[in-house]
Image (spheres, coloured by chain):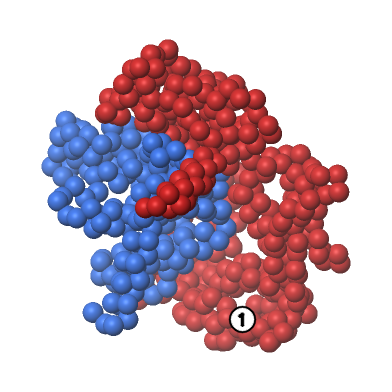
Amino acid sequence: MSGRALHGLWAAVAGAFAGALCAIAPSTIAAEASDHVTVDRIVAVVDNDVVTWIQLEKRVAPLLRRDEAPIGDRLEADLGIRREALSKMIDERILAAVAATDHVSATDAEVDSAVVEVMKQNGLTQEGLSKAVHNTGMTDDEYRQDLRRQLIEARVVQMKVVPKMKNATGLAPDVYRQKVDQATRAFLDDEKQRHYVEVRL
Amino acid sequence: MGERGAVRAGLLALIAAGACSSAPTKSATVIPQAPPTSEADELARDHVCESIPTLSSSPKPHDSDAAVVVRISTRGYREPEKVCKYLRTHAGGPIDNAVIDKDVHDLWETGLFDDVEVWRQGIAGGLALTFSLKARPSFASTRLDGVRGIPGVDTSLLPAAGALVDKAQLFKVKRSILDELAVNGYEHADVSYTTERQEDGSNELVFNVEAHAQTVVEKVIFAGNKSVKDGDLMAVMGTIPGHPFSRDMLTRDALVVAAAYYDRGYLMVQVDEPTVVESPAGDSAQVTIDIREGDVYRLGAVHVAGDLLQPEKEYLKSFWSSKQNDVFSRATVIADIEKMKDYQAQRGFQSSIEPVTEIHADKKTIDITLRISPAGRP
């Protein structure tokens, strides 16, 4: 690892630690009494939509560290996971806004097909899939909503990102995938200039 | 510690206690009953929406997850009863995160609040839940400064006087003003907003525009075009020397230049993102559009498939205006497809017609199948 990369890593670690101290009491309005515990609050605003603490916790629950690592390390790692998850949730809301503007949707039948495809690819029965889904903390309905979101996002990327990619023909699948990811990141950064995004984590 | 030291320590303790007690005191079972001294005090008070009577001697819960919610209250909004009516969270059971989260979203969607936070607190006999709110501001009036003499800024974009305003809306107004200015060449404009206290004590929301220099197109250069003349390409451009420069227009121009090539058979044309060089003062811009033309493609086999109302050859005879080996033209194909759609519609079929293409790079030809679907009867 180069000195520059190390410096960047150190800065990120220091930033995460400073943030971790704030995250211990995640309150924005006025938690004036020490025995108050925040149950829910708004952690991000995207245009007229919000991401809440409960939504974020549900998303990160399977990813948070439960090991015997020192609490400082755990808080630091957990905060990084929360920040990353929140960033992803903001991206999802921006892609949903783009999809709504361009009338991009996915039908129930298409979601059904996606479910069948997932079962086929993972060698699962309907019951097996349900069990795996419930293990992540999602209900079957929530899983279908998530698949619908993924289908819509893939369409938005296909419609708005892929046509603008240059020199993207004849690439190996993983290189192409990487190029699409980079182009999607650039597209989202550009879209963020056109949407109101406020992070309150 | 001597006597003076003890007095000093006591004083420090008192000062410290005073500093901590500046926030409203919350008792476990008693809601502050003292009359409010101001609107701020009133907003800081808890208004109980729902409570289950408990003995003040009841123990505080140890396990918050299993404890029963015995009181639900709200604070921070001048009409607490209105807030209570929105809540689906009720006393009498353990905390239900899904319901609380739904309440937070519902409260947000009322458009009344800038922030919503829910706290839990152990009190005698169970848990107290507080929905703490921060109301959105409203302004008695709004004003737009700095746009005199600048065309195209629509003052109707501003929030109406008295309407509740949120940050997303302010961002949207700012964005709209910037977009309108950019279309008119003011791409370096800045827009800020602030609140001004008026003499009568009301607040005015002020948007301030700093337009900076208007950028005018100085020159448009096409590079790499051998088969299509500069004049023919300029004819389709919206970016014109002497006119205000707009990046949105330039993005559209790159597409129409490519379309001009598609209409001349250059199916593989590549029109790069135009490069823009501005003068140091930002008042003029020189635009360069790089083009790689590629080869001319001609029409190969053409078919019509799907839900046909008559034999395929009749469609081709009546609506297809090109012949095999003609130079491909996107505009001609689109016009022919529209004629087919009109024909279908006149017979009561609203149809979608998708051209499916197969390109033969070796022969420089393109085969087209016009797929008609679905032919739904109205």
Against B368, residue A148 (above or below) is above
Figure check: B234 above or below A102: below
Colour for chain B in the figure? red
Chain letter of disc 1?
B
Where does the image place residue B209, in percent across and percent down from the top left? 75, 64
Q: Is residue A118 left or right of residue A96?
A: left
Q: Residue at x 25, y 56 (%)?
A: A72
Quadrant where the C terminus of chain B is found in the figure: top right
Tell me residue A6's x, y (percent).
28, 77
Instruction: Place residue B283 in its image quadrant.
Output: bottom right
Count of labels in the image: 1
Q: Tell me if I can see residue A83 in this picture.
A: no
Q: Quadrant of residue B111?
A: top right
Q: Is residue A68 left or right of residue A201?
A: left
In the rendering, at what x and y percent does residue B30 appear?
Answer: 49, 21
- Find the residue positioned furthest to the front: B3
Residue at 29 percent across and 57 percent down: it is: A76
Q: Which residue is mark 1?
A: B276
Q: Secondary structure at mark 1?
A: strand
Q: Residue at x 69, y 40 (%)?
A: B164
Where residue B181 appears, as percent x and y from the top left, is 73, 65
Nearest the eye: B81 or B258 = B81
Residue nearest the viewer, comparing A85 with B58: B58
Q: Amino acid at mark 1?
A: Val
Q: Residue at x 73, y 71 (%)?
A: B185
Please say whether residue B100 is visible from this viewpoint.
Answer: yes
Is residue B231 shown left or right of residue B197?
A: left
In this picture, is A172 found above or below B143?
A: below
What colour is chain A? blue
* Label 1: how many Cα within 10 Å (few below 14, some 14–19, many 20+): some
